[in-house]
Image (cartoon, grey):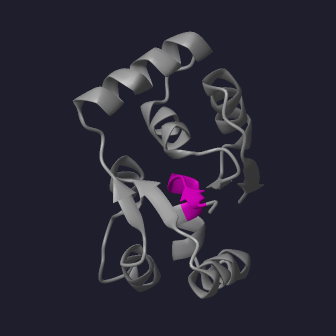
Amino acid sequence: MAAIVFDTGGLVALDRGERAIGALLAAAAVSGVEVVTSTACVAQAWRDPARQARLTRALGGFLERSLDPRAARDCGQLLGRARTSDVIDAAVTLLVENGDTVVTSDPMDIERLLDVAERSARIRAV
């Protein structure tokens, strides 16, 4: 089953209460779709949990993937092949399986990395 993969921009949109993102998460919960992000994205978005109630609640339902040594090396190789430098975009890209949806504020960079990684996903810009 396809997953929804959030980058930092997606998490920020969620935290800001964008209705479309809330509806997407509600539909995912009803249909049992897995929602995934990188712990690196969480680190970029996480500032003050007392003021980020939406993000705090939502992350309870996310699968957060960390960069282990193998994933870090894979990110570096992907960045080299793509001739880009954003480690977090690479980490998000490597979480994507064919058919997933990526929620991103950086659709052009994610699309490029997906192409280089030979992965196919729907991109939902926020």
Please count the marks in the image: 0
75 lies left or right of 43: right
Magenta residues (range): 3-10
Residue 91, how many percent across, how many down?
Answer: 45, 38
Quadrant, the C terminus? bottom right
Residue displayed at 57% across by 45% down = 96
Q: Is residue 83 among the parts visible in the rendering?
A: no
Quadrant housing residue 125: bottom right
Q: Residue at x 25, y 37 (%)?
A: 68
- Name the residue at 43% across, 31% down: 87
- The answer to whether residue 105 is seen in the rendering is yes
Q: At 45% from the left edge and 79% from the top edge, which residue is drawn?
A: 58
Q: Is residue 23 magenta?
A: no
Apparent side of residue 103 relative to residue 51 in the rendered image (left or right): right
Q: Position of residue 63 (x, y in %)?
A: 39, 64
Tell me which corner region of the image, top left, top right, bottom left or bottom right, holds residue 109: top right
In the image: residue 55, left or right of residue 39: right
Which image quarter holds the N terminus?
bottom right
Q: Position of residue 113 (x, y in %)?
A: 63, 28
Q: In the displayed structure, would residue 1 be above or below residue 82?
A: below
Name the residue nearer the viewer: 108 or 77.
Answer: 77
